[in-house]
Amino acid sequence: MGHADRPTIIAGNWKMYKTIGETVAYIHQFIPLVKDVAPLVYLAVPFTAIRAASDAAKGTNIVIGAQDVNEHAEGAFTGEISCGMLKEAGAQFVIVGHSERRQIYHESDAMVNKKLRAVYASGLQPILCVGETLQMREAGVTEFVLQTQVTHSLDGFSSGQVARTIIAYEPVWAIGTNKHATPEIAEKAHRFIREVISETWDAETAARVVIQYGGSVKPENAPKLLLEPDIDGLLVGGASLSAVTFSQIIKG
Ligand code: PGA
C-alpha cells in the first residue's frame, strides 16, 4: 500500500476566525470552487459556526468538523463541549492535540489520549496533531518527541482505531511563520511516524493511516509537499481563511 492507495485529505483549520455570517458566505463561495476536486475536503470551524456550516455544506463534498473537544460526555466543566454536542451540531471530525492547545492551554499527551478515547466512542473521526518545537529540532530530539507524542496519545487503542485516525505532522516552528518544512524534512518526519505506527501496531495499520502535513501551507508549496510518498494530505491554517486560496491548494 502506497500513497496512491490512501485517500488524500486536505483540511482547513480556521482557528478563532469567522462568525456565523462569515462562515455561510465562505461556504457558498467555496462549494462551486471545490465541487469536482479529487481530495477529500475537511473544514474545522469554530464551535458556534458548526451548525450553520454543516447546513450550508449539506449534500456537498465538504466535511465539517471542530477544532477541539472535551473528554467527558457531560458534566460541570464550564466552557467545555462534548463529542455528542459536536455531532448533533453536524461535525463529522475533530482536531485533537493541536500545538496551540498543547502550548497555550498546556494539554498533555495524557489529556489528548483521554480526548481520543471519547472521540472514538462517539464515531467522530479524529485528526491528531503532533510536532516538535524549534528548540526540540535544534536539540536533535525531533524523532524522540514524535515517537512519544504518537505512542502516548494513541496508547491503548486498537489497530482499527489508529487506522481511522488522521495524524497531522505540524512542526511548531512552521505554524503561522511562513517557514514551511521543505518536502524532504516533512517526508522524513512522516516516514518516521509511519515506522512508529508499524512498530507499535502493525505494518497494515501503518500503511493505512493518513498523515497530513501542516505549517505555512500555501498554494505555492502544497503541490511539492503532496508529491512525497508519505504525505497524504495537508492541514491548512491561515491559507484556509480565503475560499479562493484554499481551493487553489486543494486543486494543486
Ligand atoms: P498555518 O497553521 O497554516 O497558519 O501555519 C497550520 C495549523 O496550525 O494547523
Image (tube, rainbow, N blue to C red):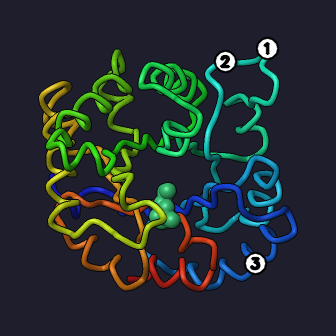
As helix, strand or loop, the secondary structure at mark 3 comes to: helix
Left or right: where 193 falls relative to 20: left
Asked whether residue 3 appears in the rendered view, the answer is: yes
- Residue tagged by mark 2? 72
The reply to whether the residue tagged 1 has its Cβ within 8 angstroms of ligand 1 is no
Q: Residues within 10 Å of mark 3 (few under 14, many from 20)?
A: some
Relative to 226, is 207 above or below? above
56 and 196: which is toward the camera: 196
As helix, strand or loop, the secondary structure at mark 1 comes to: loop
Residue 85 x, y percent position in the rendering: 77, 33
Residue 43 x, y percent position in the rendering: 60, 60
Instruction: Please name the residue shown 21% across and 73% down the image.
Output: 227
Left or right: where 167 falls relative to 115: left
> Where on the picture, by quarter, is residue 128?
top left
> Where on the picture, by quarter, is residue 218?
bottom left
Tag nearer the camera, 2 or 3: 2
- Residue tagged by mark 3? 28
- The kind of residue on which mark 2 rests is His
Disc nearer the start of the sequence (2/3): 3
- The kind of residue on which mark 3 rests is His
Relative to 199, is 29 above or below? below
